[in-house]
């Protein structure tokens, strides 16, 4: 048989294994048709977990490239392929296991398509002798398959449901039908019951116990696996889900009438009987096939009233105790690992544990983690922590351990002895808080693992969490010499970072600080302490961090490449924001002498009012502040950022933007200014004089304008009044390499002014404007329509390009390749010049 392949068997197996790992179904099914040698080599990989493999279509395959691009057609194609696979497997199942429901769903009047079968049209007497698929299926279909049985367009299934009265029997089993609205019956109970019954029949039609490694069944099916326990000799994962008709809603019991409560009690007894059978199967399997079964899970999201634990948690514990202990684990992640860990944590050696993550665990697991004895101090090799915070402060031990280590170092300094206590080398930490960010565990990690910590992320993720009080301040006394990434975000309340936090992070490269503050107090105290950040490359500030950050920190950030200053992301429209403080300062961007005079008068910083109730000043600090006030505004735009490539300013920062801040940013490629306000509010008139470089020396050459030779992307969403001369000077003198322009809400110019200003740009690929014009006006100016679609709020939107030679410009072919388009452009934006307009 080896002579049938020019490739050595070992090499062929490696190739097939990589195709399987890459989910390349198309290539695997092609190899299945080469010859018998390739077929036998491919079968174990293609049919090991076929339902998962076929659901992950390989994007590089020619068959699915177009479908992957048109993602809306993906579900129908996916359902088609899973159904073809199901038919292929069922054709090899025993005839007595092909039930009427399976025939109605899977075998319609359509011709059989053998995409997964090299000989689909073979005679029935020799069909099963060609290739056998079922013995290679080690992963049976999960309870989530199929997502659609095609009931609406399958007349055979509709006839089956009517003939058998399936839905009538379902309603008789629905114990809580009287509580819910009748209109929810079909989606809440009937259809889940149909899918549950289909899965039950399909599972046992395809199951070959001798080859099954992963088995997901319903609770009512446990007696079948118990009867065949000797045959499941390779079973590694056993998962049980409670049937829809056996489920008990504890919180609904009080609403049931007396007769239904009696039925609920009987159902509870029946459920307990099945649960005992489930535990009995695990006990018997582990005694017969020792060390084979590694995981046994009971999926039950119901909780007892007044408890955080599942109602069936006791049965889960009994199954877990039957499984072999985890010896020297290196990683704990996911509910499956934790279910085995929770009951045996005291007996497991955690010295080799390197990664801990409970991000994907259910709320029950995290509740149990808070109740078991502390264990993090036993993880001496821990390098990464991804955790939803449980308990008050699970890392307080690290602070005490660090103090003892420092004390040993101090005692042994004269003797040059190595401290006996070695610190845990944690490098990466991600903390998630159920509500607001709490400072105590954050500081414990920073102080305990500060010597090795390289990446630190913390987030409060619930916007609906009750906002009862301000979170505690964190970040005081930090010393993180190796930290290169710092991220802190909260979806509720204020991010209360200590003013000196960034001072202790001299090696940081990326800083992201965001909160959801909607209103900012306009009373002033000093902002954050200026920090020395020579390696900083990315800085993203939103909300109060953008106001409290001291811009003098940028004087040392010579490597900065991306800067974002914004207000609350969740409140993009500044309807609750008040610019009065900024406007009251009579912000004059042209009169630097007046600005210096205001600095001498000691006025408060109007762009950065801080929060005295969060960071109260000492008497000495108050005295220093009174005698040496910070200038207004502190954002004087005098930074020198030669490597800055992306600048994104929103809200007040876009409102007070000055072009002179860009004179020392020659590498800038992306500039985005966004200030979404109501019409008539916070308007501003910009002139050509703002584009001049007033700090040029007499010996410098040029026309006297600021030059950004590398800038390719510009986005302006502001209430600015801009004249035609400004656009022409901006595009031709300041930004000659511009390729993508997006403008909205600006005024003071016409469509003809826009076209004349942009048409001469050599590198322009897209120019979008939201000017309101007549329908005929673009055509009168020589533009021809590219495409038409229904835009936002029902207004027609048009894409245009320049005509033949009316406005100068060459015609661009309709077959412009996608590779020639910038990554920031949509598929429709293929022309060299495009203008987006809307009707008046």
Image (cartoon, rainbow, N blue to C red):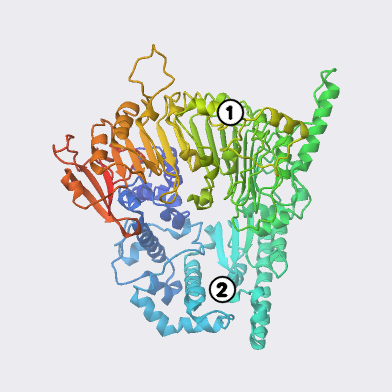
Q: Nearer the viewer, mark 1 or mark 2?
A: 1
Along the viewing direction, whichever of 658 and 126 lies nearer the viewer: 658
Labels 1 & 2 near each other (Cβ < 8 A): no
Residue 638 seen by the camera: no
Q: Residue at x 39, y 30 (%)?
A: 690
Q: Is residue 275 above or below residue 38?
A: below
- The answer for how far apart the CA atoms under marks 1 and 2 are is 72 Å
**115 left or right, relative to 455:** left
Question: In this orientation, which residue lies closer to the viewer: 604 or 228?
Answer: 604
> Along the line of sight, which residue is nearer the eye, 133 or 636?
636
Residue 314's place in the image compared with 273, above or below, is above
Q: Give how far across and how far down residue 607 sits, in percent.
A: 56, 38
Q: Residues within 10 Å of mark 1 (few under 14, many from 20)?
A: some
**Mark 1 or 2 closer to N-term?**
2
Q: Is residue 173 above or below residue 91?
A: below
The residue carrying mark 1 is 599
Q: Is residue 814 left or right of residue 390?
A: left
Residue 214, horizontal then vertical, whole percent = 55, 58
**Residue under pointer 2:** 244
Residue drawn at (60%, 75%) of the image: 246
Q: Residue at x 65, y 88 (%)?
A: 259
Q: Residues within 10 Å of mark 2 (few under 14, many from 20)?
A: some
- Quadrant position of residue 431: top right
Q: How many marks?
A: 2
Q: Does residue 201 appear left or right of residue 77 in this picture? A: right
Give me the disc on residue 345. none
User: Does the rendering let one see residue 506?
Assistant: yes
Secondary structure type for disc 1: helix
């Amino acid at each position: 048989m080896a002579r049938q392949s020019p490739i050595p068997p070992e090499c062929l197996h490696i190739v097939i294994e990589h195709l399987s790992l890459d989910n390349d179904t198309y290539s695997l099914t092609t190899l299945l048709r080469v010859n018998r040698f390739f077929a036998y080599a491919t079968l174990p990989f293609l049919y090991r977990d076929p339902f998962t493999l076929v659901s992950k279509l390989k994007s590089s395959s020619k068959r699915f490239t177009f479908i992957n691009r048109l993602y809306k057609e993906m579900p129908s194609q996916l359902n088609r392929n899973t159904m073809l696979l199901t038919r292929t497997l069922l054709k090899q199942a025993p005839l007595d296991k092909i039930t009427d429901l399976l025939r109605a769903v899977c075998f319609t009047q359509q011709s059989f398509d053998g995409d997964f079968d090299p000989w689909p049209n073979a005679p029935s007497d020799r069909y099963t002798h060609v290739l056998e698929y079922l013995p290679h299926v080690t992963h049976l279909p999960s309870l989530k398959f199929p997502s659609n049985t095609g009931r609406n367009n399958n007349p055979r299934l509709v006839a089956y449901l009517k003939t058998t009265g399936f839905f009538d029997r379902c309603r008789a089993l629905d114990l809580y039908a009287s509580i819910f609205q009748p209109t929810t019956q079909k989606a809440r109970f009937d259809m889940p019951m149909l899918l549950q019954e289909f899965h039950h029949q399909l599972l046992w039609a395809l199951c070959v116990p001798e080859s099954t490694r992963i088995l997901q069944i319903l609770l009512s099916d446990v007696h079948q696996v118990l009867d065949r326990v000797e045959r499941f000799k390779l079973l590694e994962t056993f998962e049980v889900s409670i049937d829809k008709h056996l489920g008990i809603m504890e919180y609904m019991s009080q609403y049931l009438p007396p007769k239904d409560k009696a039925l609920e009690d009987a159902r509870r007894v029946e459920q307990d009987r099945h649960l005992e059978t489930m535990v009995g199967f695990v006990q018997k399997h582990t005694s017969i096939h020792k060390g084979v079964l590694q995981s046994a899970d009971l999926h039950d999201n119901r909780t007892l009233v007044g408890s955080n634990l599942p109602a069936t948690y006791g049965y889960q514990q009994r199954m877990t105790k039957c499984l072999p202990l985890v010896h020297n684990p290196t990683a704990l992640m996911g509910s499956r690992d934790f279910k085995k860990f929770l009951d045996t944590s005291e007996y497991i050696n955690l010295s080799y544990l390197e990664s801990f993550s409970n991000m994907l665990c259910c709320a029950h697991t995290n509740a149990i983690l808070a109740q078991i004895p502390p264990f993090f101090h036993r993880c001496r090799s821990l390098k990464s922590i991804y955790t939803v915070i449980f308990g008050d402060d699970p890392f307080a031990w690290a602070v005490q351990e660090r103090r003892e280590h420092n004390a040993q170092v101090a005692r042994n300094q004269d003797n040059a002895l190595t401290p006996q206590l070695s610190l845990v080398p944690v490098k990466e930490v991600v903390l998630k808080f159920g509500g607001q960010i709490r400072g105590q565990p954050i500081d414990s990690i920073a102080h305990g693992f500060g010597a090795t910590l390289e990446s630190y992320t913390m987030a409060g993720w619930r916007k609906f969490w009750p906002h009862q009080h301000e979170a505690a301040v964190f970040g005081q006394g930090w010393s993180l010499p190796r930290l290169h990434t710092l991220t802190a975000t909260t979806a509720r309340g204020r991010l209360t970072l200590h003013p000196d936090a960034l001072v202790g992070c001299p090696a940081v490269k990326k800083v992201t600080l965001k909160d959801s503050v909607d209103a900012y107090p306009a009373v002033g105290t000093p902002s954050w302490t200026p920090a020395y950040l020579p390696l900083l490359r990315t800085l993203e500030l939103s909300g109060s961090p953008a106001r409290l950050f001291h811009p003098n920190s940028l004087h040392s950030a010579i490597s900065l490449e991306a800067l974002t200053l914004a207000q609350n992301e969740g409140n993009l429209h500044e309807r609750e924001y008040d610019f009065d403080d900024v406007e009251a300062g009579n912000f004059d961007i042209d009169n630097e002498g007046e600005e210096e005079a205001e600095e001498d008068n000691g006025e408060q910083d109007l762009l950065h009012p801080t929060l005295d109730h969060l960071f109260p000043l000492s008497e000495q600090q108050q005295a220093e502040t009174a005698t040496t006030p910070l200038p207004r505004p502190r954002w004087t735009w005098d930074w020198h950022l030669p490597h800055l490539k992306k600048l994104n300013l929103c809200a007040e920062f876009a409102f007070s933007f000055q072009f002179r801040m860009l004179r020392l940013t020659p590498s800038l490629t992306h500039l985005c200014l966004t200030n979404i306000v109501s019409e008539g509010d916070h308007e501003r008139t910009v002139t050509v004089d703002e584009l001049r470089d007033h700090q040029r020396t007499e010996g410098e050459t040029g026309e006297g304008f600021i030059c950004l030779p590398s800038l390719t992307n510009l986005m302006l969403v502001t209430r600015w009044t801009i004249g035609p001369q400004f656009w022409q000077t901006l595009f031709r003198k300041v930004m000659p390499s511009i390729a993508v322009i997006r403008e909205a809400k600006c005024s003071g110019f016409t469509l003809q002014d826009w076209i004349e200003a942009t048409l001469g740009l050599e590198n322009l690929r897209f120019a979008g404007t939201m000017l309101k014009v007549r329908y005929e006006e673009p055509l009168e100016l020589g533009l021809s329509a590219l495409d038409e679609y229904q835009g936002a709020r029902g207004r027609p939107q048009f894409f245009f390009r320049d005509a033949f030679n009316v406005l100068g410009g060459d015609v661009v072919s309709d077959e412009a390749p996608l590779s020639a388009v910038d990554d920031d452009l949509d598929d429709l934006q293929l022309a060299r010049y495009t203008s987006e307009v809307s009707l008046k």
